[in-house]
Amino acid sequence: MDTSIQLTYLLSAILFVVGLKRLQSPATARKGNGLAALAMLLAVIATVLETQILDWTWILVGVLLGGVIGTAAARLVEMTSMPELVGIFNAFGGGASALVAIAEFLATPGIGASTTGVTILLGTLIGSVTFTGSFIAFAKLQGLMTGNPIIFPFQNAFNALLLLAAVSLGAMTLGVFGSGDSQTLFYMFCGLALILGVLLVIPIGGADMPVVVSLLNSYSGLAASAAGFVIGNTVLIISGALVGASGLILTQLMCKGMNRSLANVAFGGFGGTAGIDRSEIGQRPVQSADAEGVAAELGYVNSVVVVPGYGLAVAQSQHELRKVGDLLEERGVDVKYAIHPVAGRMPGHMNVLLAEADVSYDKLYDLDEINDDFGNTDAVLVVGANDVVNPAARDPQSVITGMPILDVDRARRVIIMKRSLSPGFAGIDNDLFYMDNTLMFFGDAKESMAELVREIRELA
C-alpha cells in the first residue's frame, strides 16, 4: 500500500507541473486546469488512504459539495466578476492552510521551539494574512468598500510593529522566551495575523489590484506549502511551492509592466482618485463619431490593432468584438490584438476574455511585441482601456510617469470606444482623448459594437 500511495503522490505532482505548464496559453489552459484538478483528486484519495481515514462519508460529501459549488461558480460568474472570484479562492486557500497549521498545533501541545513549531507559525501567519487580505481585495473589487487607498499616519511603521509583535508572540508561544499559556499566546498570534492581512491591503488602490491578486495568489501557495511541511505531505509541499513561485514570478512581471517595484505597490498608496484634481477632466473639446463613421475608418484600411480594456469586460462585448475582427479580415484588413500586462483587474484578464470569444491566440501580442508597430498602423480601436494607453506616462510630472504604455497615439487614426471621458483607475485625465488623430465613439461597448458590426457589413 505504501508504494502505491507514494506512486500516486508522484503522479499527482507530475500532473500539477504539467497542468501549470499548460496554463501558459489560453489554447491549452482548460486542459491544464483539468489536469491540475485530477492531480488534486488523486492527492486527496492518497492522503485519505495513507492516514487510514476509513469513513468516506464526509470525504465524499466534501468532494460533491465542493464540486457542485465550483461548477456553479465557474458557469454562473460573469467575466467582470472573475477577479473577485479569484480573490475569494485565494482567501479560502489561505484560510484552509491556516486551519491545518492551527489544528496541528492544537493536536501537539507543548511542541516547543522545533522545526515543526516554527513551520506551524509560518503556515498560520501566511495563511491568515492571505485570508483577510484576500477578502479586503474582494471587497475593493466588488465595490463593497472604497477602491481608494486607505492611509493613516505612520501606517507602514505601525504595520512593522504589528509584525514584530506577532513574531514576538510566536516566539513566546514556542517558549523561546517569556512564559505564559501557549494556547492563549497562539490565539493572540492568530488574531494579529488576521489584522495584519487587513492592514497590508487597505492602503493599496484600485490601479494596483492586478498585482495584489497575483501576490495574494502566491501567498496562498506558500501557505499551502507550509501546511505540507507541517503534516509531512509531499504533494502539498510541491503543489504549494509551484503556486507560490509562479505567483511571485507573475507579480514581478506585473510590477515590470507598471514600471514599479513591489515595495512601491505595497506601500505607495497609488491607484485611487482621492487627492487628485479632477476639475479639468473631460473639459477639453474632442472629436466624436458614430458607428457609420467608425466603420468607414476601419473598413478601408490595411491594418487595425485592437486594444481591449476593462470596459470590454464590463460590457461583455468580446463576442461582438470578434465579429468586427472577422468582418474586417474578410475585407483584407490585417487585424491584431494588443494586450497590456495590467489591462483589466487581474493578470491575464484580457487574454481570458478574448479566448472566451474564440479569438485566435496567435493574433494576441503583448506590449513588447506590438509597440514598434503602432507607427505603421492605419487604425487602432481602443475598447474600454484608459491608463494603459495614456501618453501622460511619458510626462515626468504625471502620477503614472514611467509606466509602460501601448503607444497607440502614434498610429494614423485612433478610435476609442468608451461611455464617457471619465478617468481610469489612476484617476487622471487621458490626453489621448483630445489628440487630433483621435475619434471618440461614445456609448455602451456591447451596443456600439453591435452597431459597428451592422455598419461594416453594409460597406461596399
Image (tube, helix red, strand yellow):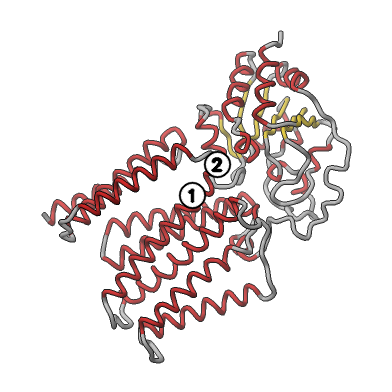
The residue lying at 65 percent from left, 38 percent from top is 311
Q: Position of residue 332 (x, y in %)?
A: 63, 15
Q: Position of residue 113 (x, y in %)?
A: 33, 82
User: Residue 269 bears which disc, if any?
Assistant: none
- Is 73 above or below relative to 226? above
- Is 144 above or below relative to 124? above
- Is 204 above or below relative to 359? below
Q: Earlier in the sequence, mark 1 or mark 2?
A: 1
The residue lying at 38 percent from left, 54 percent from top is 242
Q: Is residue 334 left or right of residue 274?
A: left
Q: Residue furthest left?
A: 1
Q: Nearest to the eye among marks 1 and 2: give it.
A: 1
Amino acid type for the residue under numbered disc 2: His
User: Tag 1, which secondary structure?
Assistant: helix
Total labels: the figure holds 2
Please tell me how crowded label 1 is: few (under 14), some (14-19), or many (20+) other residues with Cα within 10 Å: some
Q: Position of residue 209 (x, y in %)?
A: 59, 53
Q: Position of residue 62 (x, y in %)?
A: 30, 51
Q: Is residue 166 left or right of residue 459?
A: left
Q: Which part of the image, by quadrant, shows the N terminus?
A: bottom left
The residue lying at 46 percent from left, 83 percent from top is 168
Instruction: Kindly check if marks 1 and 2 are in contact, taking CB atoms under 8 A apart as contact.
Output: no
Amino acid type for the residue under numbered disc 1: Val
When asked about the image quadrant of residue 170, the answer is bottom left
Please tell me how crowded label 2 is: few (under 14), some (14-19), or many (20+) other residues with Cα within 10 Å: many
When asked about the image quadrant of residue 2, the answer is bottom left
User: Tag 2, which secondary structure?
Assistant: helix
Q: Which residue is mark 1?
A: 86
Q: Residue furthest bottom?
A: 178
The residue lying at 65 percent from left, 22 percent from top is 450
Q: Is residue 324 left or right of residue 89?
A: right
Q: Which residue is mark 2?
A: 349
